[in-house]
Image: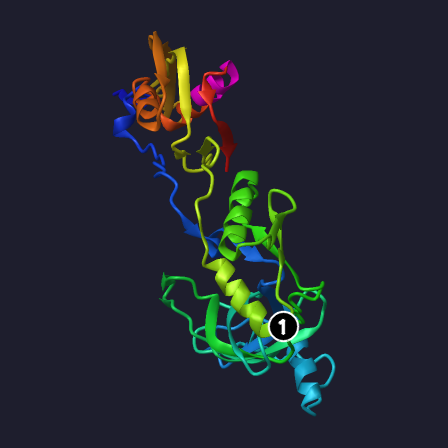
Amino acid sequence: MNRVKRTSLRIPAVLLSSLVFSFIVALPASAERISELADFAGVRDNALVGYGLVVGLDGTGDQTMQAPFTGQSLTNMLSQLGISVPPGTNMQLRNVAAVMVTADLPPFSRQGQRLDVNVSSVGNARSLRGGTLLMTPLKGADGEIYAIAQGNLLVPGAGAQAGGAAVQINQLGGGRIPGGALVEREVPLNLGANNGILELVLKEADFGTAKRIVDAINDEFGCVMAKGVNGRVIKLNGPPTDNMRVNFMARVESIQVTPTEAPAKVVFNSRTGSIAMNSAVTLRRAAVAHGNLAVTIDTQFAVSQPPPFSGGETVVVPDTEITIEEQDAYLRMVGGADLTEVVSALNALGATPQDLMAILEALKASGSLRAELEII
């Protein structure tokens, strides 16, 4: 008896309305506060990192034979506490895990201020649930200690295993300690140290927006308080005293400015196949032909039966036939002066998102698509 297995791999040309085609409709630009468009230079967070140990785990810690650095770290810690472990001792610990601790040090932080910390396993611990982080120094990029972390972990996951079966909810190799670090050192920041000069740094470089911010600040104060340096940096003549400088910066941040419209851009996500474009995208008239291939795989299974008493074995012999059919494609006119017309014209092509990427690249090369292409 023969069995027939037919597999059809088809890349259909369907309307884009039946698939996921993501696009962004940008509303007309409205006024925003300067604090949403720019930041003062120097007012920034600082990343902290440290290496420590989590103890008190319920047999879910590192296997020290496979992660020897955990035992070495514990031995060094015990020696600092006056406990000497004989060399070569295999402690076979299961309630300890080596972890990395990270935190962000906000600007203007003072000694004694508490920070939230994230704790992540670096060994082969199965879970950090129920563990306690021992005192861990947190260092900055300069190697100096800026905070000390310690406390009980909050792990939002759960898991269990028995008899070869296991179940797990969320991730168990990391946790968080709210307020788990104390600031021990402050990051020096002297605003206006350069004869009271402050720098305003735009989050996105744009000469038009920079000019509008300069004009808005000068109009607000009635004199030349701001000068543009380039498309991202603006210099301000700040007051000489700290209190006046704080009031000045707060007043500057609250000024309303209408940023210039973003340049036309189309963004491709190569992993998900999604496509996004802003309202500045336009499409000049062009002719596009788009076709697809239909690949059909037809497999028939035949049974090969050897003669009686021949000593042979019965085997299944597959017979596969592959055919490729190219679907018809016709030239279509596309074009549009606004986003709605562009989307309608591209929908009429009946292309999948992956094919649409190639079509948009061809339209860009031909000069029809008036936008920048970016792949993420």
Residue found at the far bottom of this picture: 82
**Is residue 360 found inside the magenta-colored segment of the image?**
yes
Q: Is residue 29 above or below residue 279?
A: below
* Res. 106 visible in picture: no
Q: Is residue 203 above or below residue 308?
A: below
Q: What kind of element bears circle 1?
A: loop
Q: Amino acid at mark 1?
A: Thr
In the picture provided, is 272 more to the left or to the right than 61?
left
In the picture of the structure, the residue carrying the numbered disc 1 is: 241
x then y, percent, for residue 250: 50, 64
**Is residue 265 found inside the magenta-colored segment of the image?**
no
Q: Quadrant of the N terminus?
A: top left
x then y, percent, for residue 53: 58, 76
Residue drawn at (27%, 20%) of the image: 2
x then y, percent, for residue 371: 47, 26
- Report the span colored magenta: 358-366
Crowd around label 1: few <14 · some 14–19 · many ≥20 (10 Å)? few
